[in-house]
Amino acid sequence: MNKRDLVEKIADKSSLSNADAERALSALVEAITESVANGDKVTVPDFGTFEKRERSARTGRNPQTGESIDIAATSVPGFKAGTAFKKRVAG
């Protein structure tokens, strides 16, 4: 499913126009992205939790040469699925 398909599904389920559904989806994604980037945890009940996770610095290997390389610490987005979402996917 791509963004267009998702917008159409939102429009069908909510009786919004496709344009309104696209604006709503864009606003949702922007709000979650901005909040997680600021270090906030975003919880959507029955769906899941979005959060910022820290990865510590570590040593890796270049697979072509076998040479050791230093990988810097960084922050990455994380998602943990909620119980209802997990049960629905599992069938």
Image: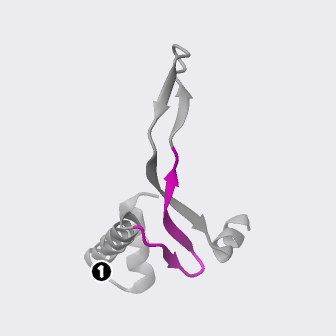
Q: Residue at x 44, y 48 (%)?
A: 74
Quarter location, residue 19: bottom left
Q: Main secondary structure of the magenta part?
A: strand
The vertical placement of 63 against 73, above or below, is: above
Residue placed most toward the observer, 53 or 59? 59
Extent of the magenta region: 39-56
Q: Measuring from the top left, give residue 7's x and y in whole percent.
A: 37, 70
Left or right placement of residue 25 versus residue 42 in this view: left
The answer to whether 67 appears left or right of 25 in the picture is: right
In this rendering, the answer to whether 8 lies above or below 78 is below
Mark 1 residue type: Ser
**Is residue 18 covered in magenta?**
no
In the rendered view, how is the structure colored?
Answer: one colour
Q: Is residue 45 in the magenta section?
A: yes
Residue located at (50% from left, 41% from top): 57
Q: Residue furthest top?
A: 65
Q: Residues within 10 Å of mark 1 (few under 14, many from 20)?
A: some
In the rendered image, the residue lying farthest to the bottom is 15
In the rendering, at what x and y percent does residue 65 appear?
Answer: 52, 13
Instruction: Report the residue marked by disc 1.
Output: 17
**Looking at the rendering, in which quadrant would you find the C terminus?**
bottom right
Q: Is residue 46 above or below residue 2?
A: below
Residue 36 place in picture, x, y as percent: 41, 67
| Of 82 and 15, the residue lying toward us | 82
Q: Is residue 81 left or right of residue 4?
A: right
Total numbered labels placed on residues in the image: 1
Residue at horizontal 68%, vertical 72%? Answer: 88
Q: Position of residue 89 (x, y in %)?
A: 67, 66
Instruction: Name the secondary structure under disc 1.
Output: loop
